[in-house]
Amino acid sequence: MYDFHFDDKDSFKVEGGLTEEIVREISKEKNDPEWMTDLRLRSLRIYNETPLPNWGPDITGLNMSEIVTYVRPNTNMKANWDDVPDNIKDTFEKLGIPQAEIKSLAGVGAQYDSELVYHNLREEVAAQGVIYTDLESAMHGEYGKMIEEYFMKLVPPTDHKFAALHGAVWSGGSFVYVPKGVQVEIPLQSYFRLNAPGAGQFEHTLIIVDEGASLHFIEGCSAPKYNVANLHAGCVELYVKKDAKLRYSTIENWSKNMYNLNTKRVIVEEGGQMEWVSGSFGSHISCLYPMTILNGERASVEFTGVTFAGAGQNLDTGAKVVHNAPKTTSFINTRSISKGGGISTFRSSLKVSPNATQAKAAVNCQSLMLDPISRSDTIPAMDIRTSDADIGHEASIGSISDDAVFYLMSRGLSEEEAKALIVSGFADNVSKELPLEYAVEMNNLIRLEMIGSIG
């Protein structure tokens, strides 16, 4: 139900490849301030000087000379859904975005290819002083200094090759600022749709939850299947201030010609709470390891994730946590599923610095292989620099019980339905953390993967 597309009716796009001329053309098209143009050009130099990673999935099949790094759809951003062009509106209506906005969201941003085409925030939430807008509008408006202060400071272009690529050609994305003490009771959402074949999407999300505030932010992604490679190299930078709380939920369903090389990072101050809820279902290759830096005393993080790797997929996912302060806590709990020869790899990186006394951390990874031709690996790394810490790790790999399948079939389910039900139960730790509409979507994705209807 996600594998549909409309004719490419973009109003502007750059040539394929990555050159200084293309980067300058994007910067001119975006009307960047001087500091942003300088950042793009510096990022391009870093990208050209940085080798591909020598670990993880093989991404040599990604040819940057063929990737179109900027595609502007045939519309500017709208605040009224009725004003969005029909072909774009039809895409998001098929994905359920307008219904979700009406039923359960405080605000919605919708990106199509390289630009946001729709953005709206409920009046009662805006009245609390919450800012939720596209990043370019914020950069050119009264929040320009704040954007300059925070943009790519947590994920600098020097971080890795695809962070540098992002810095050079980024476009679109969202800016959220929640003022001190404000509790946003219902979620905000951004949805990213890549329609153009052979293109890349490089949105940047910047969220600042100020002291004592709270927010739940939901992000969804999808793309139709083409016979050429597409690339997603977005960036998410999150700032959780003292005693603030942020939940960041993502359901990714990229098509199976997608290279998903995304970077997500959060820094949490004293008493702050961070929650990641992540579902990874699409893409040909994924490298995704959300990172949490616990910088203040009593800061905490909980990461809950599920990954489903089907035929032709190599999904390399996981999480990183750095404990930099006393009495910090972290819990990583993941489920990975592989089927039809799919490869699912879980990587965790846990670092506890010498001054992070009384830190507590636990990593739990469970893997389910649905046939003998699939593969699942768990690769934990722990660097503990203090003896005054409580650290635990647990991993298990197994297959579906024939007895459980037989029992469900004896109750009237087909074998296919029985296995899908068991897999949905295995992933329940993620679905129960999502709002109802998104839990239903995730269970639908599992069902579609089980019958081979995605990609």
Image (spheres, rainbow, N blue to C red):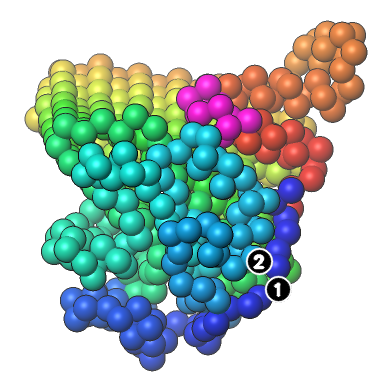
Q: Quadrant of residue 368?
A: top right
Give the alpha-carbon distance from disc 2 to disc 1, as whole Å. 9 Å
* Residue 267 place in picture, x, y as percent: 22, 42
Circle 1 SS class:
loop
Q: Residue at x 74, y 48 (%)?
A: 1
Front-most of residues 292 and 89: 89
Up the image or down, 393 lies above or below 240; here it is: above
What amino acid is found at the position of numbered circle 2 in the picture? Asn
- Magenta: main secondary structure equals helix
The residue that disc 1 covers is 7
**Extent of the magenta region:** 430-440
| CA neighbours of label 1 inside 10 A, class few (<14), some (14 to 19), many (20+) | few
The disc placed on residue 87 is: 2
Q: Which mark is residue 443?
A: none
Determine the secondary structure under disc 2: helix
Q: Is 101 a magenta residue? A: no
Q: Is residue 422 left or right of residue 29?
A: right
